[in-house]
Amino acid sequence: MAEYMTARTDYTFEELVDLKRVAGRTMDRARVTLHRGVILLLAAACPVLGVLVLAGPRPDCAVAGVYFLLGAVMLVAFWKYYRLVAARMERKTRKKRSPDHFVFGEYGVDITRGEEKARCPYSDCARLLETGLCFYLFHQGGKGLTISKANIQGGSPDELRAWLEGKCQLQAQWMGGRN
């Protein structure tokens, strides 16, 4: 069999959020934990500073209000962290981003992005992750593929999962997210 299924990943905003969330739970865990920890610390410290301003010898409601507002903004930033970093990535890559096209062959995945072409043999697969939106196929060199479930042709996400698990000799690990 020359090819089994094809897929395309357009890197929509929701797919970028999903990618950032998966990366934050796997490869970038320490960095993301540090960033979110600092944001949460600021979210807690700002209201405390607001209370101290109000309890001081010269209470200033405007300054205290700014601290309370800043604390609320930091709390929202902590809660929406992955959406914010995905929005930043989208702004940075908007003009040069093009869809990835995948062809799942007998021995590997053929990838096309614009004029660039590459093949990733199934024997190089190190990890297979799954969310409600995408599959993430990581290779032993650390690079990975983001495969959108919405744009699979020639089969279903369940069929592609079974194909990848069989060819890569890996079990897909569920990372959460919407179905």
Image: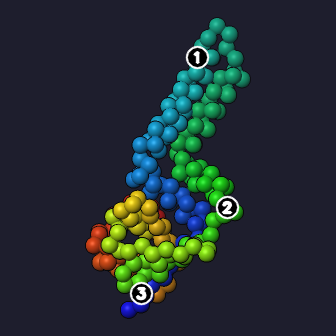
Image position of 131 (left or right of 62) = left
| Pointer 3 residue | 4
Residue 140 in sight here? yes
Considering depth in this image, is 127 or 122 the residue closer to the camera? 122
Q: Looking at the image, can residue 161 be seen?
A: no
Q: In the rendered image of this protein, does residue 90 appear above or below residue 151?
A: above
Q: Earlier in the sequence, mark 2 or mark 3?
A: 3
Q: CA distance from mark 3 to mark 1?
A: 65 Å
Q: Name the secondary structure under disc 2.
A: loop
The percent coordinates of residue 152 (x first, y second) are 49, 80
**Amino acid on which disc 1 is placed:** Leu
Q: CA distance from mark 2 to mark 1?
A: 44 Å
> Dot 1 corresponds to which residue?
52
Nearest to the eye among marks 2 and 1: give it: 2
Which image quarter is the C terminus in? bottom left
Residue tagged by mark 2?
94
Give the mark nearer the N terminus: 2 vs 1. 1
